[in-house]
Image: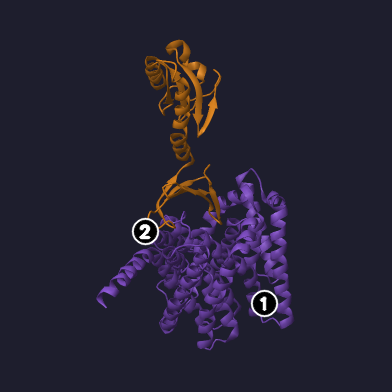
Chain colours: A orange, B purple
Amino acid sequence: MVNVDVTPLPGIGTRQDFASKAGRRIGVVNHRDGRFDLIVSKVDDPDACTASIPLTPEEAGALANLLGSPQLVAALDEQQRDVTGISTKQLPIGPHSPFDGRTLGDTAMRTRTGVSIVAVVRAGTAHPSPGPEFNLAGGDLLVVVGTSEGLRKAAEILERG
Amino acid sequence: MHDTAISLVELGAIFFGLGVLGRFAWRIGISPIPLYLLGGLAFGQGGVIPLDGIHEFTELASEIGVVLLLLLLGLEYSAAELVTGLKRSWVSGLIDIVLNAAPGVAIAFLLGWGPVAALAMGGVTVVSSSGIIAKVLSDLGRLGNRETPTILAVLVFEDLTMAVYLPILTAVLAGATLLGGLTTVGIALVSVTVVLVVALRYGRFVSAIVDSPDPEVFLLRVLGVAMLVAGLASELQVSAAVGAFLLGIAISGSTAENATRMLTPLRDLFAALFFVVFGLNTNPAEIPPVLPAAIGLAVISAITKIVTGWFAARRAGVRPLGRARAGAALIARGEFSIVVAGLALASGAVPEQMASLATTYVLLMAIIGPVGARLVEPVVGWLRTLRHRTPKTV
């Protein structure tokens, strides 16, 4: 378990950070208006920050996805190791995807490629076993299980329709 | 041109000029407040361009500027933050007040201005500019630093102290008797306590009075309540500014956030006028005689702030470099020093030179503060190499 320290910053928001095993302080400054600053402490001066990177709520969500979902995929891979020829991949709904704003059923993924969509990761939260009525949005990550051929096709469909 | 046309042209010229100055200030990394003051000096008596016809408007606008400055300050803090801040940082806060009031009080006595001016000058040198400091910390990417909560806690303490100090100052300036003064202090303390309790327990009801889903209605309600409370506070001799500050504290949650978003542009507008008007009322010819005093005051009160920050950060377990950063960050004085000086001057109970001293002082501190905060790391690094090198050469 990682212990996250929450420090109020009166007039600004809160600072939430933890000390990593490598001895660096990592966390975010959470502004009142919803913006985030990603902060990483300096090596020689743990009180100061070497980086303080402003992120919009969307960017923060994307970063959380990047950090959070590989674990999910790793866990799924673990379960499917015994089944030969089957692998797990996460496929994004890109900004130009025709399925941004349409339902999962519209992709007809199972019929067209044989792959299964086992979860949708949105803003760092996984929605497991989404039904056909699930509304997709740009920035979602689909966790997809299938053959490598099916996964390749699925990626193409999500990109071009 | 007829009168209205002249007034509009003059106001337009002032606003546009301030806009240009403000852009220039942020470009070179300092607060626009000193430039607004300089703008006021240029327009005013003995200045480059004399202004007629808009005097009444600018005077009232600058009063509104003070009310909005303090209202927004109150909105920034929730009552819970203030109470925890008070519990956690009262030692540092008290040290801050004592150390930093001392230079102002001393200079007033040295110049022979008497105890009333000493009380006012103490206020001028105590209060750091939370506006400048928040901006500088954010610009320098120091919001995530360990010393930052300490800096903010000191600012919170100062602002709460203002809520008690301003009514006392108002009473003293009005020439109150001992009994009258004590009554005002009593009223001030009681109202601060009542507001904190009300805001903690029933903050949502206060918010409900002003809240509205319609932005226009919301703006009018918040402004209306702010002026009403400020006027009432002024009538009770608690000072309009304090009334607005306490109202800001009582409004909480999402209402406070919306109010902040909506009122910030208005605050910037009226506060800019407030600084200009203060500059207007300062005679540029009076600045050279007070310059040595202002420079001395700037140097000493910069040192006292560094000591304060150092001490406060050390209590929080921050290392020496961070302590130095905390101290340097606190140097900046700005809007509230001018608010205090403005209050004192409006009463006529202090010598007029105080206007030029306060203007010059804030001009210096609003520039030294951000520059000091930027330079502190290289300077400390340089001092360290110097210290490491000395044993070898000696």
- Which x, y percent locates residue A152? 37, 18
Disc 2 marks which amino acid? Arg
Compared across the picture, whether A103 is left or right of B202 comes to: left
User: Disc 1 residue type?
Assistant: Ala
Residue B77 x %, y %: 60, 57
Helix or strand or loop: what does disc 2 sit on? helix
Question: Which image quarter holds the C terminus of chain B?
Answer: bottom left
Residue A94 location in percent, x, y?
41, 27
User: Going 43% across and 56% down the picture, which residue do you hit?
Assistant: A46
Check residue B139 in the rendering and tell me which mark sits there, or answer none: none
Residue at x 53%, y 24% (from the top left corner): A135
Few, some or many residues within 10 Å of mark 2 (<14, 14–19, 20+):
few
Say left or right for B30 vs B211. Answer: left
Residue at image mark 2? B27
- Return the residue nearer the eye: B288 or A58: A58
Is the residue B81 above or below the residue B234 in the image? above
* Any part of residue B146 in sight: yes
- Front position in the image: B317 or B214: B317
Looking at this rendering, what residue extends furthest in the left direction? B393
Q: Residue at x 52, y 44 (%)?
A: A2
Farthest residue to the front: give it. Answer: A82
Give me the chain letter of mark 1.
B
Please give the chain letter of the residue carrying mark 2: B
Res. B241 image quadrant: bottom right
Q: Residue B249, relative to residue B327: is it above or below? A: above
Quadrant assignment, res B170? bottom right
Q: Mark 2 vs mark 1: which is more N-terminal? A: 2
Q: Secondary structure at mark 1?
A: helix
Look at the image and tell me whether residue B285 can be seen: no
Q: Provide residue B278's location: percent of width, then percent of height.
A: 51, 71
Query: Which residue position holds label 1?
Result: B171
